[in-house]
Image (cartoon, rainbow, N blue to C red):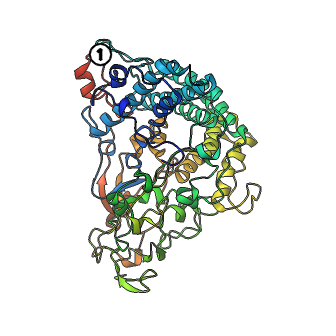
Amino acid sequence: MKNIAMTFLVAMGLSACHTLDLNPLSEASTATFYSNQTELELAVNDLYRAAFWSNDNELFSDNEWHRGQLTNAVIGGTMNADDAAVQTFWLNAYKAIARANSFIANKDRAAATTSAATITRLEAEMRLIRAYQYARLITHFGDVPLLTEPLVLDESYSVQRSGRDEVLTFVLAELDFAAANLPVSYAAAETKRLTKGAALAIKARTALYSGKWDVARDAAKAVMDLGVYQLHPGYSQLFTKAGESSSELIISIPRDESQQVFGAALFVQDNISRNAGGFGAQLPTRDLMDAYECVDGKPIDESPLYNPLAPFKNRDPRLTASIVEFNTQWLGYNYTPHPDSVQVFSSKENKKVQNKDTRAVAAFASFTGLLWKKGIDQTWADRRVEDNDAIIVRYAEILLTYAEAKIELGETDATVLDAINQVRARAYGVQVSETKSYPALTGTNANALRPLLRRERRVEFPREGLRYMDLIRWKLAEKVLTKPVIGLPDPAAQNRAKWPFPGVTPLDADGIADYSGFGTDVKVLAQRNFDKSRQYLWPIPAVERRVNTNITQNPGY
């Protein structure tokens, strides 16, 4: 792990695989642990791992679909208390919480050999990490057990859920402590450690997700006022290896092949073209593609610039930064899923080759016709390794959080427009003041700005794990996650005169696409399902309730 010790602390292993991990083995087996600065740092560093830091799976949303899974439990409406993803989420959160509690309870063992300032700074990191875990738990499960110190086994059986508001109050207070005791920045050797800005950023997100608009506004503004973060000049570069040191990144978890922290070949192949040796299986949805505005700032069903036969033209530049444009070179091969393009030119081989990215040649080529470009490094195809740093929070989110909070508070002033326009201008590669070079927002009517802000979040953050929680908190999941996943017709059924798309997709007031009028000119790949009576919260894992019957279940599970 670059800039953070890679040692995984075996002594911090926990006693149970399926429960809250309330009694870490370090308490029973290593009575002298935390006795010096090195051991304190090891304990903190162990929690800088992807298992403890992640946004939601993009496959839980309408932005992404995987050919092999058909649907997952979230978009399939089948989530239950025995779901593996639910159990893993809960387990990892409480593992981190248990380790943080153990650290905080025992940190003063090192007081004789470690400065008070160092102990306080490490404690602030741990309290931030613990607060982050609780923030994610309450947004997904609602009421959860609030554990703030190590428990012995007998005590664990009487643990009950605390109210979401109580846990939120605790989280915000912990983040205030972290913000007050963490540095604004570190020396170059420790650039990925948690900072004051990280604590404020998590506070802003947590408050936004909880509808605490004033808290979200103030925390986001505090990040902006630090003066250490700025938007990366190039949107597409930010998500590759070249962008890992960008000043836009507030929290990112280091990953590197040389340190054996990376995604394996199967993940790479799912995401790259079949011509380049992949499977073309992990796909952007047509829903996402249709969300990008045209360069006049209008949605595709209002802009005269949109042509469904040339759908990448005259669009927000983030579209071609995120999704591979047809008839462009990608990973050494011209990418076109056209059913008649049975050969393509390869710049890698310097000749025409069989086109495995059309379903007329390869039956399992991209079912939506689309492939991801965002975040895919050009070396993936050769190395069969995905080791880009995991971005958790970046400055663009802070700007849009500030804008959204102000809109919801009825404070739509020039600072709101400036925050949104900074993000929009960066997409076009220009300064925010160059309002004739991008579709700058100018009006301050809250009802008009709200859908524009929501669309901005969607096209700015695909593949970053923010869409699912946006759908949940905006109460749009019941509408969005009940619509089918749409793909291209089978090659034999494809009307060539309507390739790739048969017409202009209607979008409703929330920007949600409606493909029901296209008939057989589109293909239903899978049906999403979402039960609004229960799915706005996840189920408490059944295994937890079998161990401790005092933990109640969410309604409907």
At x 62%, y 28%, the residue is: 215
Q: What residue would you read off at disc 1?
A: 153
Q: Among all residues in the image, which is located at the extreme right? A: 433
**Snapshot quadrant of residue 13:** top left
**Snapshot quadrant of residue 207:** top right
Q: State whether residue 34 is above or below residue 298.
A: above
Task: State the quadrant of the C terminus.
Answer: top left
Element under disc 1: helix
Residue 491 in view (yes/no): yes
Residue 165 in view (yes/no): no
Q: State whether residue 287 is above or below residue 406.
A: below
Q: Among all residues in the image, which is located at the extreme front? A: 113
Residue 189 lies, in percent from the top left, at 60, 46
Residue 542 lies, in percent from the top left, at 25, 27
| Residue nearest the viewer, comparing 226 with 38 | 38
At x 63%, y 63%, the residue is: 295
Q: State whether residue 441 is above or below residue 360.
A: above
Q: What's under tag 1, amino acid-wise?
A: Leu
**Snapshot quadrant of residue 15:** top left
Q: State whether residue 132 is above or below residue 390.
A: above
At x 55%, y 29%, the residue is: 122
